[in-house]
């Protein structure tokens, strides 16, 4: 289960492209920016399933501070076992802070199958200073975390792991549009294949909101199932 999605970011999970349909270039931000702007209190919550069975949860909760800073708090918990015997455990907690559409801070900690990792990062002019167990140094200020909720990552060639600061090389390919059933609501979405250590498929609606994720690891299918349309009654 290594890098389940790069810090999910790995499920960090863990990204210009011309997309067939309304979510094409007109709906894409400048490099590293935001398309969909979360509102205070928004929560994206996925049930994570392995081979169709419960595997854990992936939640992103948003706070908007009085100065306009957007905080994205990611909490991922995955468990696998044989009866009462635990065989695999993954816990990720990460916080991103965005100002004026740019990442200004990142903090993350992961416990993955007995191993720990961490990262802190802070914007400094044209770069972001990264101090992580997987990488220490600078990356361009336009770099985006591999936390998946920001559709602007589909324009990226490199992503920053929320687990350990690793810089992840990615190649993203648009794969058309699909109609998805999200808790009984029909949602038309744009599909992307993210090619990296493992192939991850991501879906975003025309507003740039993350609505689905799937990938295979060790021959097992992992699927993110959205509990409910998190934009309902919020505009």
Image: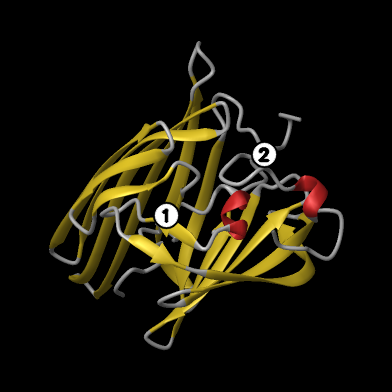
Q: Residue at x 51, y 47 (%)?
A: 45
Q: Name the residue nearer the viewer: 202 or 25.
A: 25
Q: Residue at x 37, y 69 (%)?
A: 4
Rendered view: 197 above or below 206: below
Seen as rendered, the residue at the extreme bottom is 219
Q: The C terminus lies in which quarter of the figure? A: top right
Q: Name the secondary structure under disc 1.
A: strand
Q: Position of residue 127 (x, y in %)?
A: 39, 40
Q: Position of residue 50 (x, y in %)?
A: 44, 74
| Viewer-side label of 1, 2 | 2
- Mark 2 crowdedness (10 Å alpha carbons): few <14, some 14-19, many ≥20: some
Q: Is residue 53 left or right of residue 135?
A: right
Q: Position of residue 22 (x, y in %)?
A: 86, 54
Q: Name the residue nearer the viewer: 219 or 140.
A: 140
Q: Residue at x 52, y 63 (%)?
A: 157
Does the rendering let one see residue 92? yes
Instruction: Give the label on residue 36, or none.
Output: 2
Q: Position of residue 26 (x, y in %)?
A: 82, 47
Q: Name the secondary structure under disc 2.
A: loop
Instruction: Give the label on residue 57, or none.
Output: 1
Q: How far separated are the C-alphas under marks 1 and 2?
A: 22 Å
Q: Is residue 86 left or right of residue 229?
A: left
Q: The N terminus lies in which quarter of the figure? A: bottom left
Rendered view: 74 above or below 80: above
Q: Earlier in the sequence, mark 1 or mark 2?
A: 2
Q: Is residue 175 left or right of residue 13?
A: right
Q: Is residue 67 left or right of residue 182?
A: left
Q: Quadrant of residue 193?
A: bottom right
Q: Name the residue nearer the viewer: 202 or 179.
A: 202
Seen as rendered, the residue at the extreme top is 66
Q: Residue at x 56, y 24 (%)?
A: 40
- Mark 1 crowdedness (10 Å alpha carbons): few <14, some 14-19, many ≥20: many
């Amino acid at each position: 289960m290594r890098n389940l999605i790069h810090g999910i970011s790995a499920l960090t999970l863990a990204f210009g492209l011309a997309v067939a349909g309304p979510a094409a270039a007109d709906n894409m931000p400048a490099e590293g920016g935001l398309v969909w702007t979360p509102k205070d209190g928004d929560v994206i919550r996925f049930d994570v399933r392995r081979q169709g069975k419960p595997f854990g949860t992936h939640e992103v909760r948003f706070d908007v501070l009085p100065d306009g800073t957007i905080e994205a708090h990611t909490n991922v918990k995955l468990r696998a076992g044989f009866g009462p015997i635990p065989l695999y455990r993954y816990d990720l907690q990460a916080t991103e802070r965005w100002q004026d559409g740019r990442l200004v801070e990142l903090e993350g900690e992961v416990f993955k199958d007995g191993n720990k990792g961490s990262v802190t990062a802070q914007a400094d002019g044209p770069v972001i200073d990264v101090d992580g167990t997987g990488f220490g140094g600078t990356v361009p200020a336009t770099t985006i975390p591999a936390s998946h909720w920001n559709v602007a990552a589909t324009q990226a060639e490199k992503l920053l792991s929320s687990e350990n600061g690793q810089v992840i090389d990615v190649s993203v390919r648009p794969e058309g549009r699909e109609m998805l059933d999200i808790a009984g609501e029909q949602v038309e979405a744009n599909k992307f294949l993210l090619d990296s250590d493992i192939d991850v498929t991501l879906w975003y609606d025309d507003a740039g909101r993350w609505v689905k994720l799937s990938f295979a690891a060790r021959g097992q299918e992992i699927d993110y199932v959205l509990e409910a349309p998190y934009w309902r009654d919020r505009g």
